[in-house]
Image (cartoon, helix red, strand yellow):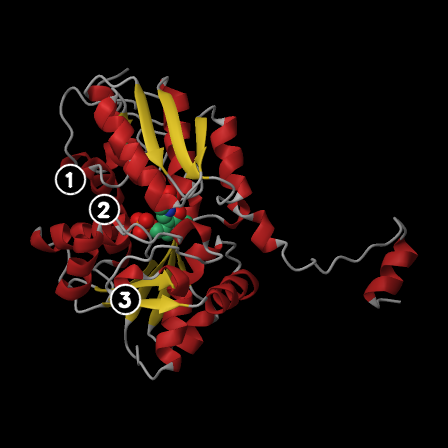
Amino acid sequence: MTAETPPAALGDAPNRGVLLRFAEHLPITDATPMISLGEGDTPLVKSTHIVRDIGCDALYFKLESCNPTGSFKDRGMVVAVAKAMEAGATAIMCASTGNTSASAAAYAARYGLGVYVVVPDGKIARGKLAQSAVYGAEIIAIEGNFDAALRVAREITAKHPIALVNSVNPFRIEGQKTAAFEIADALGDAPDVLALPVGNAGNITAYWKGFIEYHHRERTSKRPRMLGFQAAGAAPLVHGAPVEHPHTLASAIRIGNPASWKTAIAARDESGGSIDAVTDDEILAAYNRLGREEGIFCEPASAAGVAGLLKLVAGGASFAGKTIVCIITGNGLKDPETALKTEPPIHHVAAELGAIEREMGWS
Ligand code: F0G
């Protein structure tokens, strides 16, 4: 290594990753291992079509689906796992609707930690289950929903020497806030509005923390209005009370009692924003539009931000002159069942030029 060479991350992602890029904003010590799977630095893509219906100045999608395990969880997980390693942990655990478990399992595999993921039995998308399986996690499927899974994960980690890496772990929030920095750096200022799905409410908490910190450091002139969206059948923050049996096809946000309840409400109120509900039909309509009109294949939960913006506009809201960023939280490949729920319009033909020309109407 020459004097000019930056210190390489432990794990062959030199100069990349959330820990190295945002070290000055993170609770890192000399003893923190600078681990990475190349998370962060995700694309901010301008809307080409949906923007017209929102009527704003500019609409951007932050493609958190481009993180190494296909969701925003990697930003926070890398910090939580590094701090757990620093503290001497040899195993980690999380409750999950699928993405947190995939992320925890990946970092644990890479850095030789034991990993236990507690998931609602039969209720997480197949792609996410595949990820945990391939990364070698111990998969504990419980009878019950995410809220029950988080309760037992807290009990187990309080009793056994296993680090809990859910977003109740403050290092997760620290890592996830870096997405706000990336957005502000890319736009040259904070956007006017940030729209995102809300489940356990860690992410809205993290973005708000990030925007507040950047504003304090005078890196931005303003802070965005935070618009969070829950699924109508799993909307405790909208109703103001826990939902005992949350239901929605957006399995990632099928959560009835968010752990970061208070901080989500604070983000809403301090930013002058709102937390609203969108129906499964609205989520699916936005999911299909993102695919067909924007070339973005996200998982259903990730379409809640777009669904919510469209709903607000239909209800008379105006975003004229505003810059909006919508967070695309997870990759569509994680949930192939939803993608293939309706039979895909496939042309079944012989491997012959003439047959294909006839089928396509080219002859
Ligand atoms: N979008 C996706 C794709 C998610 O996986 C989640 C949460 C959210 C949005 C909501 O974020 O919980 O911070 O409000 N998934 C968690 C999990 C619960 O276990 O993977 P949140």
Amino acid type at image mark 2: Lys
Label located before the other in sequence (2 or 3): 2
Residue that lies at the very extreme toward the bottom in this rendered image? 316
In front of the other: 147 or 305: 147
The structure residue drawn at horizontal position 40% and vertical position 53%, both measured from the top left corner, is 254
Within 8 Å: ligand 1 and the Cβ of disc 1?
no
Kindly check if marks 2 and 3 are in contact, taking CB atoms under 8 A apart as contact. Answer: no
Label located before the other in sequence (2 or 1): 1
In front of the other: 74 or 87: 87
Marks 2 and 1, Cα distance to the nearest angstrom? 9 Å
Residue indicated by mark 3:
239
Marks 3 and 1, Cα distance to the nearest angstrom? 35 Å
The secondary structure type at the circle numbered 3 is helix
Amino acid type at image mark 3: His
Location of the N terminus (image quadrant): top left
One can see residue 41 in this view: no
Q: Local crowd at mark 3 within 10 Å, few (<14), some, or many (≥20)?
A: few
| Rendered view: 166 above or below 60 | above
